[in-house]
Amino acid sequence: MKTAIVNLCRLLLATVFILSGFVKAVDSLGTQYKIEDYLQAMHLGITLPDFVTLALSIGVSATEFCIGIFLLFAIRRRFSSRLSVIIMAMMTPLTLWLALTDPISDCGCFGDAIVLTNWQTFWKNVVLLAAAVVVAIWPMKMIRFISESNQWIVINYSALFTLAISGWSLYDRPQFDFRPYHIGSDLRTGWMQMMEGKESPYADFFIERMDDGEDITEQVLDSKGYTFLLVTPYLEQADDSQLDLINQVYEYAQDYNYPFYGLTASGDKAIGLWRDVTGAEYPFCQTDGTTLKTIIRSNPGLVLLKDGVVIQKWSHNLLPDEYELDKPLEELPLGHLPDDSVAKRIASLLLWFVLPLVLLSIADRMWAWTKWIRKRKRLISYINKKEVKMRKKIVAGNWKMNMNLQDGIALAKELNETLKAEKPNCGVVICTPFIHLASIAQFLDQNIIGLGAENCADKEKGAFTGEVSAEMVKSTGAQYVILGHSERREYYKETPEILKEKVLLAQKNDLKVIFCIGESLEEREAGKQNEVVKAELEGSVFNLSEEDFRKIVIAYEPIWAIGTGKTATAEQAEEIHAYIRSIIAEKYGQAVADDTTILYGGSCKASNAPELFAKPDIDGGLIGGASLKAADFKGIIDAFK
Ligand code: PEP
């Protein structure tokens, strides 16, 4: 709701500012005159030079237009909303004063395009001030139409556009003429209506001969055919750079008997000076200065009437020359009403300003969209990678044949209390001799510490004296079993085939297998470590289905490092872990490989665990000697902190 209100207010402000700035820029001279009117009405007693009031006119229109664009596109949201509050907070009391004292009939906020009374202007400003305050309170609720990184294009384009419009209006004439003397205006009819006492904008329009002061307005407007009016509100300020062209037009008018009048508000002295400087021979008539400034925004400017209708206007910069004026007007295009309608000019405005911005916005939105997609893809792949990194981290203890029941229970209890008090950042498992399992399972919080056996039989049950089956292990409450440990392979001659059976039986009984692989020193020295681990995996676990393989934890334990105090360097370990993962990927695919936990074992201690576990393919450790003391084991677990 809040967002909707803010955006509604913002669009209202944007529309008004853009319209107001645009109509002022399109008629820079008109805006300049208005500023001069204001200064006079305020009785400030200062007369600013023309170039200052003109600069003010261009500045005011550019500021209004750009703020409107900023609000429309939600550019620099805090700045533009605060600026609009400041402007409205200044304009509202000013227009209240205008409404109360009425020194100027029309405030000129929309140039000549929309003429409001002073009270209408004041209430309009009250509404806009309220809207500006709403937007300034929640500027960040303005929805962006363009991304921040591309805002500079809109900012510069809008500023250049409004300055270009102002510049063009000064060089030529306002591209949109909202005054009663625009091309196509029927002055004769309007003036006649005024004479009949009807409401008319031509009340101040008169033409008086200089010599006898006779009003010849009717005569000029009533004359059939073409009449040239050279409009020079104040000759003292008129631009005389194009005097040759003016004289050429006059000569042309004489050649074809078209009446030609110079209209000015200046006196005889200024006219005499003008004649001296320009060699002008055309007759001058008196007309109201403000009316002349309204007729054409150029000093001098040329107006062509046909049967009292304005059919052409030229600024002094774009007067027709002798090459254009080589035939009677009737036969020339400029002797007829131009066909560039307002609709055409609006279309070109849309083409030059609105269309590029719309295209830019679309391109920007598409760019933002593709950026969003790319970001999302990156995020997904990052999450995936994280998930890869998130495969289960485990620190598992292998007590081997150590500790009697009481000592074992005491150690398990101590670990249990320690890790309950300070939750580990990885999975923790203790694998104990068979005789400890049932007792420890009673008190161990298996949500924190998993319990496992160090071995299980390769037979399901029966006459195998001294053996413990997987089912028995499971029945103690244990969840894990270490299989394939090098000591079992070496001392008890457990072959890959035997281990294959054990793995199957363990999984059948829902035990999670920690499957050990690793090369001997001779094999390492012969560079056969990859071959060895591959053969061990192929011999005992690569027969599993993908689903079952996913349940296996691999423990890479170089035999030469077990219980010897020699650790594989982190780089050596990472290298072979990566290799193991690659062969799992070959067999089961990358996803399975990425999900497989591969532990390192072999003289792992609290001191070297952090470096080892920091490697991307090392997901924890299988710890022998250092798992027999709670503090040592905890030190290794803490490597994941
Ligand atoms: C082990 O026997 O699995 C083992 C890694 O031992 P240690 O940590 O003592 O080298």
Image: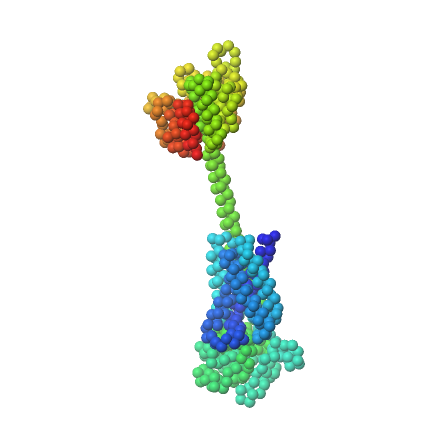
What colouring method underlies this structural image? rainbow
- The quadrant in which the C terminus is found is top left
Q: Residue placed at 52% from the left, 76% from the top?
A: 43
Task: Please tell me which residue lies in front, 343 or 151.
Answer: 151
- One can see residue 552 in this view: no
Residue 442's place in the image compared with 160, above or below, is above
Residue 457 coordinates in the image, percent (x, y) = 48, 16
Q: Is 362 on the left-hand or right-hand side of 396?
A: right
Task: Please tell me which residue lies in front, 435 or 295.
Answer: 435
Residue 245's place in the image compared with 482, above or below, is below
Q: Residue placed at 61% from the left, 70% from the top?
A: 119
- One can see residue 95 in this view: yes
Quarter of the figure with residue 214? bottom right
Q: Residue placed at 45% from the left, 20% from the top?
A: 408
Residue 196 coordinates in the image, percent (x, y) = 66, 81
Task: Please tell me which residue lies in front, 443 or 32.
Answer: 443
